[in-house]
Amino acid sequence: TREQDIITITHNKQLMKVETERAKLEDKYSRLSREQDAQKTLLSERLLKFESEKAKLEDKNEELTREQDIITITHNKQLMKVETERAKLEDKYSRLSREQDAQKTLLSERLLKFESEKAKLEDKNEELTREQDII
């Protein structure tokens, strides 16, 4: 009947809206996933760079330690500069670690929000399906 056609059309429109929203959420999830991967890559690159710099500084520190019996006060000042740079790099590493933790928390929150929205959409979809089945 005409009434059933109207109801069916209305339900189809609602279903299309739900599907559109689901697709948007999937796109958002995909984008967030790519962003997270990019952030992980960036943090990994920073960590590798830090480890390389730290290894170089540790090597330099060992060299200075071996030579400390025969070096002058000037060399001791250079060692202090190396220690200062190492401390800066450790601070930088600590900051990067905190930033990574904050990014992980943010991404976890975004993922939880997405999952909540997805569950709501799935519930709505099931409700619409039940309503359509009734019709």
Image: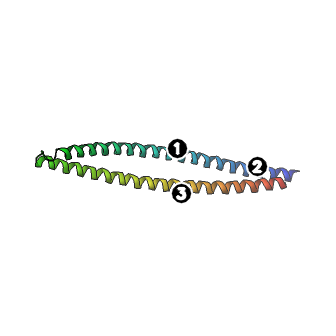
Q: Which residue is mark 3?
A: 109
CA neighbours of label 2 inside 10 A, class few (<14), some (14 to 19), many (20+): some
Q: Is disc 2 placed on a helix, strand or loop? A: helix
Mark identifier at residue 12: 2
Q: Earlier in the sequence, mark 2 or mark 1?
A: 2
Q: Are marks 3 and 1 in contact (CB under 8 Å)?
A: no
Residue closer to the observer: 99 or 120: 99
Pinpoint residue 10: horizontal percent, then vertical percent. Answer: 77, 52
Specify how the rendered protein is coloured.
Answer: rainbow
Label 3 amino acid?
Answer: Glu
Of marks 3 and 2, the one in the foreground:
3
Q: Residue at x 32, y 52 (%)?
A: 90
CA neighbours of label 1 inside 10 A, class few (<14), some (14 to 19), many (20+): few
Q: Which residue is mark 1?
A: 34
Q: Earlier in the sequence, mark 3 or mark 1?
A: 1
In the rendered structure, the answer to whether residue 132 lies left or right of residue 100 reads right
Of marks 2 and 1, the one in the foreground:
1
Q: Is disc 1 placed on a helix, strand or loop? A: helix
Compared with residue 110, is residue 48 higher up or lower down, i.e. above or below? Answer: above
Pinpoint residue 8: horizontal percent, then vertical percent. Answer: 81, 50
Q: Is disc 3 placed on a helix, strand or loop? A: helix
In the rendered structure, the answer to whether residue 133 lies left or right of residue 34 reads right
Q: Residue at x 83, y 53 (%)?
A: 133
Label 1 amino acid?
Answer: Arg
Q: Determine the CA span between mark 3 and mark 2.
A: 32 Å
Q: Earlier in the sequence, mark 3 or mark 2?
A: 2
Looking at the image, how many numbered discs can be counted on the residues?
A: 3
